[in-house]
Image: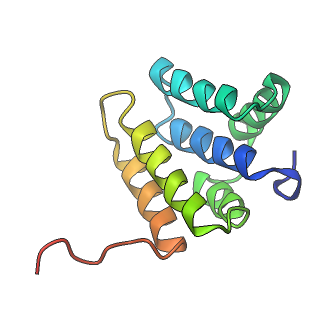
Amino acid sequence: MTEASLSNDEAIVKLMLILAHADENYHQNEEKVIKEIVKKNNIKLNSYNKILEEVQKSKNTYKEECLKVLKIIKDEELRKKTLTLLTNLASADFILHEDEILFLQLIADEWGMYKQKLIN
């Protein structure tokens, strides 16, 4: 599946899979969260498996893969929802890895959703 052929829902799943693999450990809790999204959005298991295989076999860096997929999701509300889903996924294995934080920051920066300062 090329990025051009992905629906918004499939793009979200691909981002989730990229994030889940960023620490090189696809935790069963992460898999459970992603499969719930797949089911909720009526994505065929075959599509999920193809996307998973692409993520696992990609020669590109996770950052390169992420940047390609981010361009698909254009709606601001969907971007907010996606960032929330990704944040929840990052904590699904009860460990927030540095790679996951950097991944979330990259997305927030690309979508212009990064808060510069929390405290003045």
Observer able to see residue 59: no
Q: Residue furthest bottom?
A: 120
Residue 78, given in percent of the width and then of the height, sits at 59, 58
Q: Left or right: where does residue 76 sit relative to residue 106?
A: right
Can you say which quadrant of the picture contains the N terminus?
Answer: top right
Check the image and tell me how it is coloured.
rainbow
Asked if residue 68 is positioned above or below residue 118 in the image, the reply reads above
Can you say which quadrant of the picture contains the C terminus?
Answer: bottom left
Which of the pair 24/72 is nearer the observer?
A: 72
Q: At x 58% / y 30%, what residue is drawn?
A: 34
Residue 32, given in percent of the width and then of the height, sits at 53, 21
Q: At x 84% / y 25%, what residue is drawn?
A: 46
Q: At x 62% / y 25%, what residue is drawn?
A: 35
* Residue 40, picture quadrant: top right
* Residue 118, picture quadrant: bottom left
Asked if residue 89 is positioned above or below residue 75 in the image, the reply reads above
For the image shown, how many numbered marks are present on the structure? Answer: 0
Residue 17, given in percent of the width and then of the height, sits at 61, 38
Observer able to see residue 16: yes
Which of the pair 22/82 is nearer the observer?
A: 82
Q: Residue furthest top?
A: 28
Q: Left or right: where does residue 33 sit relative to residue 113?
A: right
Q: Left or right: where does residue 119 sit relative to residue 52?
A: left
Q: At x 64% / y 47%, what residue is drawn?
A: 12
Residue 68, given in percent of the width and then of the height, sits at 71, 62
Q: Left or right: where does residue 119 sit relative to residue 66?
A: left
